[in-house]
Image (spheres, helix red, strand yellow):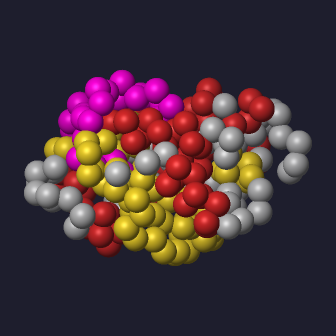
Amino acid sequence: MNALPEWVASAEHTAHAYDLIADRYADVWFTNPDSDLADAFLAHLPERSRLLDVGCGPGQYTRHFWSRGHTAVGIDISQRTAAGARARCGRSMFARMTMMALGFPDAAFDGVWACASVPHIPSGSVGSALAELHRVLAPGGTLFVNVPLGLGARVETPADFAQEGTYGRFFQRYSDAEDFLAVLRSTGFDVVDSGENVVRSDVLAHRGTISAKWFNVTAVKS
């Protein structure tokens, strides 16, 4: 799709798309975090770190960080998703918020975990999103961020959500991992680790299991 309307990638539309699938998304992911990926991120952080889970979904990673002895807060653009995370985790440390305007002071966190959330930001705005994540990190703080690899943007169809008259989630894909790394470095991060993996899931309503190649990056605020 080459001529997507701008509203498809808007924060309001992304929030609506996740409101529609909040329960289904939780069924798939809440008990299925990638613990190895999360623990590799934690290996770069001191004990009892202050962590921000950006795009926390049902709270699977926020809960994992708690289990490892860290203080963690989860935010999500979807009100229904954030409310579900509070209910499932039995804690109030979740809020509705956009990564483009985080309601936290400068240098509030030792680590920021942004797993599968930054791709909802179009490439023309991703630098602003990364700059905001940089702002809330303490000097020397650690960021995890990942993006899907591929050609152009992907947008789910109404049928994917058993809905009519609206698009589903917007994903900005990157044809070259170096293009994303260049933006990351330009916003003040030093890359310390990167790699690719394939993620398989069946979140959507009318598809079987889908696979996507993701580029994972761990970086430090310089």
- Image height check: is 66 above or below 96? below
Q: Position of residue 202 (x, y in %)?
A: 58, 62
Secondary structure mostly seen in magenta is loop
Name the side, left or right, on which 155 lies relative to 145: right
Q: Residue at x 45, y 56 (%)?
A: 145
One can see residue 209 in this view? no
**Which residues are drawn in magenta?**
90-113
Q: Residue at x 57, y 42 (%)?
A: 127
Q: Position of residue 101 (x, y in %)?
A: 46, 27
Q: Position of residue 173 (x, y in %)?
A: 68, 57
Q: Position of residue 165 (x, y in %)?
A: 81, 33
Q: Quadrant of residue 203?
A: bottom right
* In-front residue for pair 188/136: 188
Name the side, left or right, on which 80 lies relative to 210: left
Q: Quadrant of residue 83?
A: top left
Name the side, left or right, on which 53 lies relative to 28: left
* In-front residue for pair 161/131: 131
Count how many numbered circles sit on residues in the image. Answer: 0
The residue lying furthest to the right in this view is 3
Does the magenta-highlighted stretch encompass residue 217? Answer: no
- Image height check: is 163 above or below 203? above
Q: Residue at x 10, y 57 (%)?
A: 47
Q: Residue at x 26, y 36 (%)?
A: 107
Q: Quadrant of residue 106?
A: top left
One can see residue 121 in this view? yes
* In-front residue for pair 64/115: 115
* In-front residue for pair 149/125: 125
